[in-house]
Image (cartoon, rainbow, N blue to C red):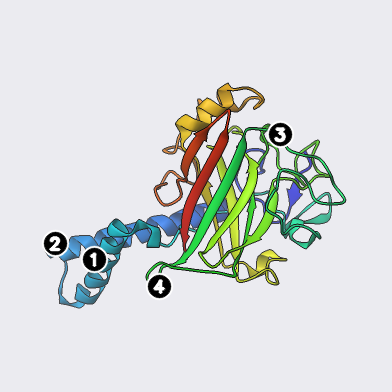
Amino acid sequence: MSQPSHHPHLEPHDDFGGLARDLRVLLERRRALGWMAGALLASCGGGGGSDSASTSSSTSSTTSSSTASSCSVIPTETEGPYPGDGSNTVDGSIANALTLAGIVHSDIRTSVAPASATATGVPLTLTLKLVSTGNACAALSGYAIYVWHCDAQGRYSLYSSGVTGENYLRGVQVTASDGTVSFTTIFPGCYAGRVPHIHFEIYANTAAATSYVNKLKTSQLALPLATCATVYASGGYGNSAANLATESFATDMVFSDGVSQQLATLTGSVAAGYAASLTIGI
């Protein structure tokens, strides 16, 4: 496999140069959880007068999350070593699918020109809804969402051996008036060291969605593991079944501190294909 240089991140097949950055991302999330726990303790009588404003704010936030979880800000996650957003290189060349003509497309199974390969696998329709957590969960239209994920064999286009010349399973869509985008793709495979997941970045508009420097948010979504096992048992997914058997949300480097805000709702079947949906709060 060709290895990306500059901006590496800890995922399978990585070097460990990005360990410190990934740990910082996870530490920031744990610090936030610790702050919320402290504020909750104070609201139960453990805090002094100077903490009252903080306690009130935390209590309000917790109540909002429990009654309208779709309004919670989605956690920021590492983009991993294979983003294809201009933030790193492969064999000395910048890897940036965002500058490709045709990258704004909904069916991301087939590479855009000049590449032409099509990724095979169980069909998956992915619908994401972008909402404003600061404006009563109002839908956000006109934003650009870039998604990417591995193929059935766990390979990432642009980076992995055998598909460095391809750009499939990458694409951008613009949120409609109801805040949604939809992608036609395949169910991603599972490689050693991670549970199945899909990456995404959010940009203010398509004009900004040409380089990682303009992104507003980076995160990942997870898929129900029982359904993943069913898909992989159907064949065509290489070592995915064996890899999945050794992974869990509890041990995953990204989702071990909580997955509820990032776990997609999934319906469908292997024969008919699946539909996944997730509401993303920013």
Under circle 3, the secondary element is: loop
Q: Nearer the viewer, mark 4 or mark 1?
A: 4
Under circle 1, the secondary element is: helix
Q: CA distance from mark 4 to mark 2?
A: 26 Å
From this view, report whether residue 167 is shown above or below residue 151: below
Position of 240 with respect to 34 (left or right) is: right
Residue type, label 3: Thr
| Residue at which label 1 appears | 59
Mark positioned earlier in the residue sequence (4 or 1) = 1
Q: CA distance from mark 3 to mark 2?
A: 54 Å
Of residues 142 and 100, the one drawn nearer to the viewer in this rendering = 142
- Quarter holding residue 216: bottom right
| Residue at which label 3 appears | 120
Which residue is found at the position 73% from the left and 56% from the top? 88
| Residue at which label 4 appears | 134
Mark positioned earlier in the residue sequence (2 or 1) = 2
Position of 41 with respect to 225 (left or right) is: left
Residue type, label 1: Thr
Under circle 2, the secondary element is: helix
Spot occupied by residue 191 in the image (x, y as percentages of width and height): 61, 33
Under circle 4, the secondary element is: loop
| Residue at which label 2 appears | 44
Which residue is found at the position 52% from the left and 26% from the top? 230
Which residue is found at the position 80% from the left and 51% from the top? 112
- Quarter holding residue 34: bottom left
Mark positioned earlier in the residue sequence (4 or 2) = 2
Q: Nearer the viewer, mark 3 or mark 1?
A: 3
Spot occupied by residue 181 in the image (x, y as percentages of width and height): 58, 57
